[in-house]
Image (cartoon, coloured by chain):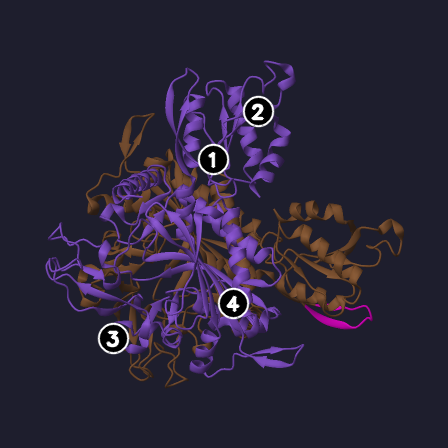
Chain colours: A brown, B purple
């Protein structure tokens, strides 16, 4: 491909991304945090639909990894983290990015990522591209958010320092012994956690992809040392299957076998699972074989034995750890990017129009079913439609809509990815063809095909599709 | 009641509370955060069972308040909060507790709560009880956790200050306009959120009750000004019903109609819903009529109009707000306190023993059903039991246990509150009475009664009980 074609393709991708961002704001998926006050850089709020989408993702992850397995249990640790935990893990000393200042505009950039940065004073100049910008020497910038805790927090007492966790993993390692003692788990077993983590990124970018506050879905899977490499490969496969099961096709995923020298120093093997975002191929999840590094450092720093006693072999050993660590917000963004489509369709009158549709997997869709009385000024239709709504609502998110032409109501649901729409019409009431009494029109989002279904069969039909 | 009797009753209650705390650690409900390093005061980690219990509570709250209603939508805002948001809301200036130092032991105490505090130097002396301890003058101590954000965060740049939110409510107010513009909600409507909040309590206490990191379940319900008082009463009733539906009986709840002068200055009416904890009657939730205070201050500070336009009456007005704000961790603690019981039972051989049981409502219980093959060394029993497990597991948390006498396995599940136990025996295999083939013994936790049920009926029976 010529450089010119590549550029125009990227311009198209950027325009595509713009449309997704715009839809997310307009329909209430994602808002900038504190937008009212100019925004808080690198922080995002999920609106009504985004909150549901994210919940569906987290719930499915929890169900697949904890509920449906015998060997993994959950944990929900605090965000505020004791400084000794992060000293032992190496984060206090070493969790940093190199940073440079532009001497012209005073802005700060990551020294290892200069070519995406733009000097504000000299728009024609990209830092690092030559002598146009003068940059300071790189210096290390710790990415952790620090705070002060306790009654002496305003006295600059070093003992009052605490951090917001930079990863959920550490609370799992620190509680590993308590879990072993209380849960009757046996190696190999996992501890899983979903929760917020925080990194003071120098340059947050790519919408919600690289943000300062983000949610992780992490498993630390404890095993015998000799099983670590094999389990890393097995987890890679399991995690790829997970993404397929939420609607991200395998061909859009790339596996990076991180080479020697580029992995974290304690990792013997790391796979990055990457997705083709419009802004580039970027990491969704890392599957890392962390060896016994973490338990080892905590055992040493705390002075408490963290060895596991195998009742069968009578051996005592420090388990090794395989960590599938997924970014929740990144996956939500991948779901949005993958689902978004504009297509040209022909309406009843033969007129062409653009249909915007989010082709979410039904299990991820924020709203599962739209419910529409054909006309809002016919009390019997409205009453019947509300009755249908009430039978479905205890089991799933539904959206009742009586406003506007039925075609417009379908389009509004297409745009937020609702997989099914149900219309209550005169046939439903038994006023047309008597045989159609108590049936409704069920419309499928992707094919736009419509069929009749008995109201009594609706719930089980939908539940089957949504699982 | 004499003072002596009161004291002994309180001593009993303290012992009762100790047992709950001990069970919570031993069985993996709650661990102290960073216990390995001596603990982080006021922070707690939920272990495998605690994480499930908390999830059940949050899911039920979300289902009842958002999924099953047309008029409330969800939000999931960032924890890191723009300082202008909290300046406008009054938290930067005024969210503080008065604090005093004991001149003998140097410890700090809340000046408004001295009688529960103990001087470390003079154990016989309670601060505030007279001249035995000398205290400093009270000074105001802001309860918010502060941090620094962005590339200039290490330069003491005032612009880099950000806070951990002290309540989830503010992100709702700040995003209220975006939600109105994107979600087609009409007054009266609510925005609901579940998430972590942070307050640097001077003296965290009563286990997880008053902690520095905690989770809230808040609804801001926007309405016409004339409806505020009525809706506050209605929400009080709805919320009381919620607690009954999760297993907290009405008679253990107290309603405090907070009198004039003790409410927040912006509130026209506040009800506290309190529960009889072993350590005292304490607040679970506040239902507060906040008027238009919050939208008013944000409209003023941001300079952006936040009025609502009523399309029917063609009026423009600032909505008033009723806020049911529940403490998630407190409710979890109330569930544990309410559920815990030790009872004397007689075993098969007529021997008395103490049975510890958590009488959770089935919908809250972390594990819904225990599954037990009668004997673990009979492969047909084990295989059948695992088949039963696999039919239930996609729909609920189950626990498969083949270790030890069946009575002991029941007891282990009683202690964590599992409402049902299923035993697969030789009758199940059709080896005893042929008519019992493919039936199992279903044991109910509270009554300990056992009945036979067909495997084919088990899932629907359990799902009915768990909803």
Label 4: element kind = strand
Chain-order first, disc 1 or disc 2: 1
In front of the other: label 3 or label 2?
2
Q: Are marks 4 and 2 in contact (CB under 8 Å)?
A: no
State the extent of the magenta-drawn residues as a range: A344-355
Asked if the residue at tag 2 contacts the one at tag 1, i.e. Cβ–Cβ closer than 8 Å, the answer is: no
Q: Is residue B67 magenta?
A: no
Which quadrant holds residue A360? Answer: bottom right
Q: Which residue is rendered at x = 69% and y = 45% of the image? A: A460
Read off the chain for label 3.
Answer: B
Mark closest to the chain's N terminus, 1 or 3: 3
Disc 1 marks which residue?
B418
Mark linked to residue B155: 3
Measured in 3D between alpha carbons, the distance from the residue under mark 4 to the one under mark 1, in whole angstroms, is 39 Å
Element under disc 1: loop
Q: Which residue is mark 2?
A: B451
Secondary structure beneath label 2: strand
Image x and y of residue B321, in percent: 51, 70
Give me the residue at 75% from left, 67% from top. A407
Vertical placement of residue A32 versus A260, above or below: below
Q: Can residue B76 be seen in this snapshot? A: yes
Q: Chain of mark 1?
A: B
Residue placed under numbered mark 4 in the picture: A30
- Gap between marks 1 and 3, in whole Å? 54 Å
Q: Are marks 4 and 1 on the same chain?
A: no
């Amino acid at each position: 491909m010529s450089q010119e074609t590549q550029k125009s393709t990227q311009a198209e991708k950027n325009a595509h991304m713009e449309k997704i961002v715009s839809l997310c704001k307009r329909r209430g998926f994602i808002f900038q945090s504190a937008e009212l006050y100019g925004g808080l850089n690198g922080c995002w709020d999920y609106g009504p639909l985004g909150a549901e989408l994210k919940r569906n993702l987290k719930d499915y992850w929890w169900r697949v990894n904890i509920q449906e397995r015998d060997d993994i249990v959950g944990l929900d640790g605090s965000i505020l983290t004791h400084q000794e935990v992060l000293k032992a893990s190496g984060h206090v000393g070493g969790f940093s990015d190199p940073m440079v200042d532009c001497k012209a505009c005073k802005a700060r950039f990551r020294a290892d990522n200069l070519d995406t940065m733009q000097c504000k004073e000299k728009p024609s100049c990209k830092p690092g591209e030559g002598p146009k910008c003068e940059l300071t020497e790189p210096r290390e910038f710790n990415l952790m958010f620090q705070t002060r805790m306790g009654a002496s927090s305003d006295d600059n007492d070093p003992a009052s320092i605490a951090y917001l966790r930079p990863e959920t993993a550490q609370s799992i390692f620190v509680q590993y012994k308590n879990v072993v003692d209380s849960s009757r788990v046996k190696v190999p077993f996992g501890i899983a956690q979903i929760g917020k983590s925080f990194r003071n990124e120098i340059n947050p970018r790519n919408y919600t992809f690289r943000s300062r506050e983000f949610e992780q879905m992490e498993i630390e899977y404890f095993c015998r040392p000799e099983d670590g490499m094999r389990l890393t490969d097995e987890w890679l496969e399991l995690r790829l299957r997970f993404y397929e099961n939420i609607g991200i096709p395998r061909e859009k995923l790339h596996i990076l076998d991180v080479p020697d020298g580029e992995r974290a120093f304690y990792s013997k093997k790391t796979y990055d699972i990457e997705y083709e975002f419009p802004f580039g191929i970027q990491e969704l999840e890392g599957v890392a074989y962390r060896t016994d590094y973490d338990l080892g450092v905590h055992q040493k720093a705390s002075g408490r034995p963290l060895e596991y006693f195998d009742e069968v072999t009578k051996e005592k050993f420090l388990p090794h750890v395989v960590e599938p660590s997924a970014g929740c917000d990144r996956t939500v963004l991948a779901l949005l990017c993958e689902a978004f489509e504009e297509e040209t369709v022909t309406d009843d009158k033969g007129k062409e129009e653009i249909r915007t549709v989010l082709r979410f997997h039904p299990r991820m869709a924020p709203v599962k079913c739209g419910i529409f009385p054909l006309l809002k000024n016919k009390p019997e239709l409205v009453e019947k439609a509300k009755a249908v709504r009430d039978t479905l609502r205890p089991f799933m998110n539904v959206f009742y809509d009586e406003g506007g032409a039925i075609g417009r109501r379908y389009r509004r649901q297409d745009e937020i990815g609702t997989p099914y729409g149900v219309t209550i019409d005169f046939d439903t009431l038994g006023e047309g063809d008597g045989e159609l009494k108590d049936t409704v029109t069920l419309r499928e989002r992707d094919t736009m095909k419509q069929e009749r279904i008995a109201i009594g069969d609706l719930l089980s039909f939908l539940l089957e599709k949504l699982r």
